[in-house]
Image (tube, grey):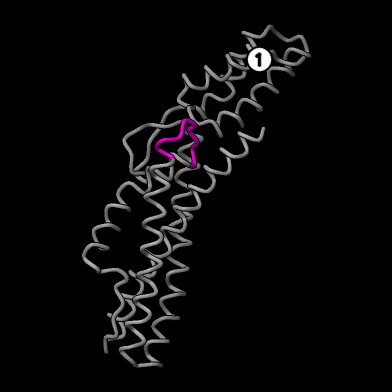
Amino acid sequence: MKLTNQQIAIIDQTLVLNGVVYDDVKLELIDHIATDIENQLENQESDFEVALKKSFENWSDQLQLANSFWVNTKKAVPRMLLDKWILDAKKKLIKGSVIAIVLTVLITNIERIADNEIVIINTRRILQVIFSLELATILVFKFIIWKSDRKTFSGFLFQTQTRFAVLFMMFIFCLKGMPLLSLSPDLKINLASNFMAMFYMVLPLFFLQLAFKHFQFIQKFKIS
């Protein structure tokens, strides 16, 4: 039995009351919950109201509001979103660190082999341009997503995770301290400074991925 638009709207409103306010997540959950309710109605187990209640009881654990020290917000979100958020944060940290380590070793070797101040200056200029473009793109995307009528979980993650990162990036950009490359005779200092530079060059790319996911959903939603 196919649900009516009014019944779909009731599911949507119930999800909002349970803290699910993001369109991309709601779209996915509505599909699952509607299918579950339709199966109950086809088997003549109950009417719509009873089936709705039973279906949401099945999702109660996933929709329970929670928070974690892994995420930098005081706002509680449904458990299913929090788990996704924590997994995303851990993946970023691990992937960003691995990529930064590889780039650090590569750049440090180039510096050591070239042993030339000009190489450092040119490399730093190139990285500063990339860093500036990343910062500018993040700021533009933050404004666009903030103005958007559509709320997505990817957009929420982007706005939340870049909140303090952007302030830090702007601070070090104003101080012209990024990228912090150095040709120190001490290999440990050389590696440490290059790692910091590479990590804060790589991290914005993961933030931008979230923004692109938001825009992809918006585009998909417009087409449909």
Q: Does residue 129 appear left or right of residue 214 in this picture?
A: left
Residue at the image point whose x is 33% and y is 88% from the top = 118
Residue at the image point whose x is 39% and y is 83% from the top = 108
Quarter assignment of residue 71: top left
Image coords of residue 50 (percent x, y):
63, 9
Q: Quadrant of the C terminus?
A: top right
User: Badge 1 is on which residue?
Assistant: 5
Image coords of residue 104 (percent x, y):
41, 76
Q: Does residue 215 appear left or right of residue 69 in this picture?
A: right
Name the amino acid type tagged 1.
Asn
Mark 1 burial class by Cα count in 10 Å: few <14, some 14-19, many 20+: few
Residue at the image point whose x is 63% and y is 11% from the top = 6
| 140, above or below 174, in the image | above
Q: Of residues 54 and 100, which is closer to you in this image?
A: 100
Total numbered circles: 1
Q: Quadrant of the N terminus?
A: top right
Residue at the image point whose x is 36% and y is 72% from the top = 195
Q: Does residue 111 appear left or right of residue 173 in this picture?
A: right
Image coords of residue 56 (percent x, y):
57, 20
Q: Is residue 175 magenta?
A: no
Quarter assignment of residue 199: bottom left
Q: Residue furthest left?
A: 175
Which secondary structure lies at badge 1?
helix
Image coords of residue 207 (percent x, y):
44, 52
Q: Does residue 158 appear left or right of residue 214 in this picture?
A: left
| 156, above or below 5, in the image | below
| 216, above or below 49, in the image | below
Q: Which residues are the magenta region?
A: 145-154
